Image (cartoon, helix red, strand yellow):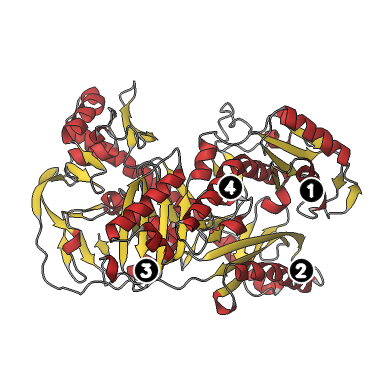
Amino acid sequence: MARLLQAPFRIGVDVGGTFTDLVVLDAAGAVAAFKSPSNPSDPAEGVLAAVSLAAERLGWEPKDLLSNCGLFVHGSTIATNTLLERKGARVGLLVTEGFRDSLEIRRGIRRDVWDHRAPFPPVLVPRYLRLPVTGRLDAHGNELTPLDPATVHNALDSFRAEGVQSIAICFLHSYANPQHEHQAAAIVREMWPEIFVSCSADVAPIIGEYERSSTVVLNAYVAPRVVPYLRALDGRLAVLGLRHGVLLVQSNGGTISVSELGDRPVQLVLSGPAAGVGAIAFFGRDTGADRLVSIEVGGTSCDVTLSADGSVAMADQIEVDDYHLSVPAVEIHTVGAGGGTIARVDTARLLHAGPQGAGARPGPAAYGRGGEKPTVTDAQLVLGRLKPGPYADGAITLDLARAQAAILAHVAQPLGIGMEEAAAGILRLVEQNIQHAVERVSIERGYNPRGFTLIAAGGAGPLHGASVARALGCKAAYIPRLAGVFCAFGMCNADIRHDHLRAWLRDLDEPGGQAATTDAFATMTAIALPVLAREGFSGESAICRKGLDLRYVGQQWTVAVETESLNPGAIRRAFEAEHERLYGYSQSNGQIELVNLRLTAIGRTPGLQVPPPQADSSTPAPRETRPVWIDDKRGLQPTPIYDGAKLRPGQTVMGPAVIDEATTTILVGAGDRLRVTDAANYLIEL
């Protein structure tokens, strides 16, 4: 097989909690997918092990594979896990005198306004490490009081004594003028050159002191662990033969080189799931629909992303474990609904599924690694949707007896019901959680999911896709043949992306406003294009898109609008249309103010072309028949099992049926019709 591969290759590597997924695409569009056990204690070793496995299976040496690679894209959860596991650096924060407690005061906004007792997560920088610095700017960036270097020196002496490992700087109004922050950073680097230092004006130059301080603190918190890892991995792969630097998937769905990322690893907090953007863009053409919502269900969680009219929903403010981040990010809603989600019965004899998960170790009871609690994977196995035996090239083996024992002991017997009924109840709860997650990014954002096609991806997603799509009223469910390596494949179709932001608080209709805004965007473009050029993109492959954050005067939150025209009338019409869609109303004569200017600089990578196998209109024959629980009405019944590798474009399968694919398993409901698309993927017509 290897000698049939045509260089240059594209390689996408997605490091997950259980497996590291690696996809190789050659110049002719041939695809090879691999799964290798992750190494949480040393993610770099997990990446190198996946590369070695792929090279071995393809008959190459790792050096030959990498030296013929023109695009190596890496997505990782290391930044996210550093935060979630509280394994970040000891951070010292320099603040404007008098604003020492802004980080801890937060905004006073609670997710549940009726719950006044639930504590916020512990602040990452305790008060004795939040030290004031003399110096003050006004809201326009004019200096009121010069920066006092002595106060910076005194703070650094205290930080040294307390064992600080990383320093964050957030001064009042630095979005308007970063001069004081940069002066303080220069003093830090002079006195303490080996320490990481982050300025809020560089990481998140936005209006809102709490938002900037939270973001820069999180950046400083993860930087000492993430940045050395990325630089070391980049160097190790270069030694092994990689000629081009590693590209990293950012939270915005685009990629960036290690060198251009610099000391801003906070941009990687959604690195893994955001890679689904590239996959949605590729598979979206095959679905024949322009409104898509994807569920990517792995071992631990389900990530939901919405794409409408070719654009994936974006957010400029996100929360990770209740910590605020102001970075451009794909709007992904995550719920604890994966193959390893644990089911339990509480003291009131109510069944629960999640959010707790079994993880990679010990994993579901069926793995035989010491896990005893029932999970979604155990339920699927008990209901016959999964087959006992080896999976993922023998990396795991599913034991039916262990799964049955776990569900009997922890669910069926406490509830006084049958084993299959208990397993089906677990799946109903999980699918309801997934349904609510989809509604969160659709209905709550002004979209009706009935007009969407649901893409079911991840190793576990295609087992739930048809059921969830039916509950939502979606047009159809679409399953990529490479669903189990969805994000790794998407990385190979990702563009370079840099987001530039400038605070711009002024009235939309003020005299001379259009000319000033045009000049500001010209300045931002002059900064953005050289960055793309350094990464090898210029001319038609370098694209800059303008965006605006606007609001009616008096509103707290902004509405994002993308428009090429900077005419105030055109901006007003675009804003009012979006405001109407989001909130159901607009003010025809309302006073609108610009809050931020956004420039998205994109380096276009060549589009993927994956040739499908030859079409076949014959009726496919099942590989076997086994009892499978279809739904509550039909229960267990003999169900045909098809080998996905033998299905060709043009063929159809009537449900109920199960399709076994290399990286996933697909359940086709009773009465549903599965059609193999022209690109050899699966469309389930409900």
Q: CA distance from mark 3 to mark 4?
A: 40 Å
Q: Position of residue 637 (x, y in %)?
A: 10, 46
Neighbor class of circle 3 (other Cα within 10 Å; few <14, some 14-19, many 20+) is some
Q: Which residue is mark 4?
A: 227
Secondary structure, mark 3, is loop
Residue 446 is marked as none
Q: Residue furthest right?
A: 145
Neighbor class of circle 1 (other Cα within 10 Å; few <14, some 14-19, many 20+) is some
How many marks the image carries: the answer is 4
Q: Which residue is mark 2?
A: 509
Quadrant occupied by the N terminus: bottom left
Residue 186 is marked as 1
Q: CA distance from mark 2 to mark 4?
A: 44 Å
Q: Earlier in the sequence, mark 2 or mark 1?
A: 1
Marks 1,3: beta carbons within 8 A: no
In the picture, residue 153 is in which quadrant? top right
Quadrant occupied by the C terminus: bottom left
Q: CA distance from mark 2 to mark 1?
A: 40 Å
Q: Is residue 339 left or right of residue 155?
A: left
Q: Amino acid at mark 2?
A: Asp
